[in-house]
Amino acid sequence: MRIMKLLLLFFTFNIFFYHEINVFSNSKPNYSVKSLNSSRQFSDGYWNILAKPNSSQQIRLLITNHSNNTGHYKISLCNLTTNDNASINYGISNNKLTSKNNLQNCILDKSNVKNVSIKKHNNKIVTFDIKVPNKPYSGILMGGVNISSNDKETHFEGIHNEFSYSIAVIIKNSKIPTNPNLKLINSEIVHNSSNESPYIYSYMENNRNNFIKGLKIKTTIKNENGKKIDEHINNGSSVAPISKFRIINQLKKYISYGKYYVYIYAVDSSNHKWSFSKIISFGNNATNLTNGNNKSGKTLLFATSSLFIIILIFAFAFFIRNKK
């Protein structure tokens, strides 16, 4: 009888947890995207449009819904920007640009974001109308079309993968390239917590209409005596045209207040080279937190802890005395 109960319990356990053990994944998107521009304007997987000043252009794409339900999609055309530590962002972001002469400002539509619904096993054409700037410009205006699904598959059991498409867009007046121009705007040492070592922030920009790829950035920090105290290398970085960004590196150890020298050397895959240096001061008389050696805070913590322990001892002694 006991064996029968155990078998019944085992059978019930397997039925109850069966859907937990078998995990499935939607490994493919249920929609597809195709450019409708000519091969002269779309090749190698991205839009590359050679256009005269003040001309009108269109970005045209076909979205096909392969699912058995109505699909809802978000399509945006955004400027190409640069994230912290020099990585490319094709989507909506708060990253800054150095010029208003950018792709997003050329869009004639009321918004650079479109939301569309497509019935099951159907498709829809989405377009963005663009007006090329009146004045000729050197280099490229660069951005990206991003397509993502707004649907949440609540009926799907298992791992739900969210897919999106990002396709580059380049509009230029000429095939003659322009050289990028990397600049160091400022550097500072930032300390957010007494429990960790400080960070070195280097604020940089590429103020020309050219893409930087394969960028290697070496940041070296020395003290007043010229002694190297830290060094960081960022490899395989990319920088969008006319974009601002930060290089952020955490120092390997705490440092004392004082004057420091920051040296930055950068080289890209086209062998463009840049070097910068900056003198910065670390420390603030208003707080000892940034030092990583907060003596006043430690003293206050010790005094508070000691007082708490003394109160506990007296309370315990009082309790024992009254009990007797």
Image: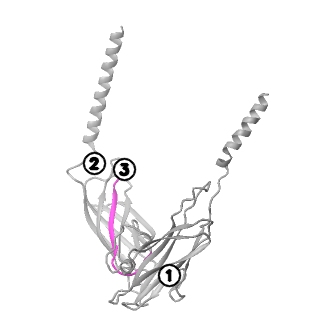
Nearest the eye: 117 or 80:
117
| Mark found first going from the N terminus, 3 or 1 | 1
Q: Is residue 82 left or right of residue 222?
A: right
Question: Considering the numbered disc 1 on the image, is that residue within a helix, a strand or a loop?
Answer: strand
Q: The disc labelled 1 sits on which kind of residue?
A: Arg
| Mark drawn on residue 289 | 2
Nearest the eye: 38 or 46:
38
* Image vertical order of residue 70 relative to residue 321, above or below: below
Residue 206 in picture, x, y percent from top left: 35, 76
- What residue is pinned by disc 1? 60
Would residue 239 be visible to someone looking at this image? no
Residue 158 in picture, x, y percent from top left: 62, 54
Q: The disc labelled 3 sits on which kind of residue?
A: Glu
Residue that appears at 46% across and 86% down:
49
Residue 27 in picture, x, y percent from top left: 62, 63
Alpha-carbon distance for marks 3 and 1?
50 Å
Nearest the eye: 276 or 135:
135
Q: Is residue 130 left or right of residue 33?
A: left
In reply to whether residue 201 is colored magenta, the answer given is yes
* Image vertical order of residue 137 relative to residue 155, above or below: below
